[in-house]
Image (cartoon, rainbow, N blue to C red):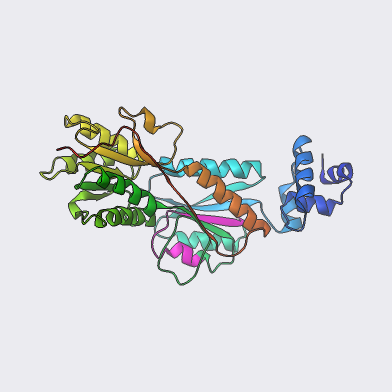
């Protein structure tokens, strides 16, 4: 079925059907839904070249993928991408990955915008005063940041979770349980999410007159092996922590292994809380001792970023709106009162 046939069947003009399929805001929601349902029912697929000529849009979302020996594609990124891809697929959008030198991503952003390869881009893993964000804000292309940056004198659209609030609540619970020696096994502290998580822990401790010692902070790429090594170092100190807050379930796997290898127990010797990005293949309740977590789905975040990008492409969303999701604290068997 082509556009002309679909339009005739619906008794609508080809222009109206085309605008409904491409998300133009002047088409009312009832008409849009009717057109989308008919297109799906009859297997209509717009011709990409014709759509680009008619609308000036490619139907593509772009992501600049840093590459090189120092770059790891971790499961957090893959899970986010799955959510983004689920939404894009169901809304006739494609995702374009453009590889770039990790130290010079700006050149690739300039190229894909100049060539009009994509309609919008998203930026992930932002750092304070992130150069990518500063550049894209000047290039005139719709964008969303997954996470937040700091140090700019302009606002920008983003989606983030309340990292500081989540880790504040986790640390506050541990303090309430009598723990005075807390440690934080964090992600890369060059990235804003990790900075916010450390702030949350420090704020909770300060409220009770406690501090987070520099020897009790580990900032690492979030892998199982790094979690293991960090926990071994912390737990073999003379003033070992009685509780650890960990930035990832994947790192928590390593912490649990280190506790076992040292002949310790959770929660008898160590209370443990980790952040759960809701991986379908790694569930906190299936740990040897069900793991307490701060919980927010990174897959749902990916879908929401795609949804907002689609809205920005079609003109349904404008401006520099930030969106911060609250994070649940789920208490399970891995926390207890501080050991005597």
Identify the magenta region.
118-135
Q: Is residue 14 above or below residue 292?
A: below
Quadrant of the drawing holding the N terminus: top right
Q: How many marks?
A: 0
Q: Residue at x 46, y 50 (%)?
A: 326
35 relative to 91 in the view: left or right: right
Q: Residue furthest bottom?
A: 153
| Residue 312 visible in the displayed image | yes
168 relative to 106 in the view: left or right: left
Q: Residue 340: say if magenta.
A: no
Q: Residue at x 52, y 43 (%)?
A: 300
Q: Position of residue 91 (x, y in %)?
A: 66, 45
| Residue 70 visible in the displayed image | no
Return the residue nearer the eye: 75 or 66.
75
Return the residue nearer the eye: 253 or 107.
253
Q: Position of residue 329 (x, y in %)?
A: 39, 43
Q: Is residue 65 above or below residue 143?
A: above
Q: Residue furthest left?
A: 238
Return the residue nearer the eye: 74 or 149.
149
Q: Position of residue 182 (x, y in %)?
A: 22, 47
48 relative to 204 in the view: left or right: right
Q: Residue at x 37, y 28 (%)?
A: 286
Q: Residue 122: say if magenta.
A: yes
Q: Is residue 163 above or below residue 241?
A: below
Q: Is residue 111 above or below residue 88?
A: below
Q: Residue at x 22, y 54 (%)?
A: 212
Quadrant of the drawing holding the C terminus: top left
């Amino acid at each position: 079925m082509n556009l002309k046939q679909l339009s005739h069947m619906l008794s609508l003009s080809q222009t109206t059907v085309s605008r409904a399929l491409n998300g133009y805001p002047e088409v009312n929601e009832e008409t849009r839904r009717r057109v989308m349902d008919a297109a799906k029912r009859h297997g209509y697929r717009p011709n990409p070249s014709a759509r680009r000529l008619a609308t000036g849009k490619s139907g593509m979302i772009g992501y600049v993928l840093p590459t090189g020996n120092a770059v790891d594609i971790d499961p957090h990124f893959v899970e986010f991408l799955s959510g983004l891809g689920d939404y894009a697929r169901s809304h006739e959008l494609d995702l374009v990955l453009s590889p770039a030198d990790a130290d010079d991503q700006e050149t690739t952003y300039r190229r894909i915008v100049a060539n009009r390869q994509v309609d919008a881009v998203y930026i992930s893993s932002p750092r304070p005063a992130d150069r990518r964000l500063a550049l894209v804000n000047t290039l005139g292309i719709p964008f969303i940041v997954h996470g937040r940056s700091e140090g700019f004198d302009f606002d920008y659209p983003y989606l983030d979770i309340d990292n500081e609030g989540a880790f504040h609540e986790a640390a506050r619970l541990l303090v309430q349980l009598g723990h005075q020696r807390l440690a934080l096994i964090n992600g890369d502290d060059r990235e804003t999410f990790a900075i916010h998580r450390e702030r949350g822990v420090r704020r909770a401790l300060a409220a009770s007159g406690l501090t987070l010692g520099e020897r009790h902070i580990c900032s690492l790429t979030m892998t199982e092996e790094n979690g293991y090594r960090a926990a071994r170092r912390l737990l073999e100190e003379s003033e070992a922590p009685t509780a650890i807050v960990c930035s990832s379930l994947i790192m928590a796997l390593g912490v649990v292994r280190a506790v076992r290898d040292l002949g310790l127990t959770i929660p008898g010797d160590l209370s443990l809380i980790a952040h759960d990005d809701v991986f379908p293949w790694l569930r906190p309740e299936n740990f040897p001792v069900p793991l307490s977590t701060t919980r927010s789905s990174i897959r749902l975040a990916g879908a929401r970023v795609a949804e907002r990008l689609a809205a920005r492409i079609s003109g349904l969303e404008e401006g520099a709106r930030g969106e911060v999701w609250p994070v649940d604290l789920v208490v399970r068997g891995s926390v207890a009162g501080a050991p005597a």
